[in-house]
Image (spheres, grey):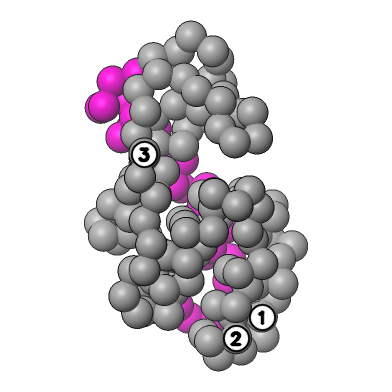
Amino acid sequence: MKTSEQGVALIRDREGCILKAYQDTVGVWTIGVGHTAGVSEFDRCTEEQATAWLAEDLMWSEAAVNLVEVPLEQHQFDALVSFVFNVGQFAFASSTMKRLLNAGEPPEVVARQFDRWNIPPEIISRRMGEKAQFLGTQFVARIAA
């Protein structure tokens, strides 16, 4: 599967788009829409470059979610890609969330796992939005850039 246009838009909204390098909440140099590969302190980019990096960076998140062994609805896939984009493919690969998905647990059971990924505290509203998206309910929270 691939992330839908709405899913990409929500990731952009959750991540924000900052055209000069900054350190995220854990000190990682970041630029554009959550892009971290090869970023250093004085880097700058254009809106077009940020969009291109996002497309490239989404590929590894999509690949990680595509390893889930049960069928997903588009909104579930998009929510999981947003989650993996933020926490990383290796964290997701060994997560209880992925184990529950592969065991065929109901979406309500799987969705509770979003609540466990709540550090730093600033991420809680993002997780609430991803959880609501996964469940196909109203998006209750969005992060501003």
Q: What stretch is highlighted in magenta?
A: 45-72
Name the amino acid, label 2. Answer: Val
Labels 2, 1: front one: 2
Predominant secondary structure, magenta span: helix
Asked if 42 appears above or below 134 in the picture, the reply is above
Is 99 situated left or right of 8 in this image?
right
Foreground of the two, 140 or 51 = 140
Q: Name the residue under label 2.
A: 109
Q: Pinpoint residue 120: horizontal percent, then vertical percent.
A: 63, 48
- Residue extending farthest front: 121
- Relative to residue 136, is residue 122 drawn left or right? right
Question: Which residue is identified by label 3?
Answer: 145
Residue shown at 71%/66% (left/top)?
Answer: 95
Measured as percent of width and height from the top left, residue 69 is found at 59, 76
Callouts 2 and 1 close, C-beta under 8 Å: yes
Q: Quadrant of residue 134?
A: bottom left
Q: Say which amino acid is labelled 1.
A: Leu
Give the CA distance from mark 2 to mark 3. 30 Å
Q: Residue at image x 44%, y 47%?
A: 58
Of discs 1 and 3, which sits in the foreground?
A: 3
Residue 100: give its label. Answer: 1
Residue 68 included in the magenta stretch of the image: yes
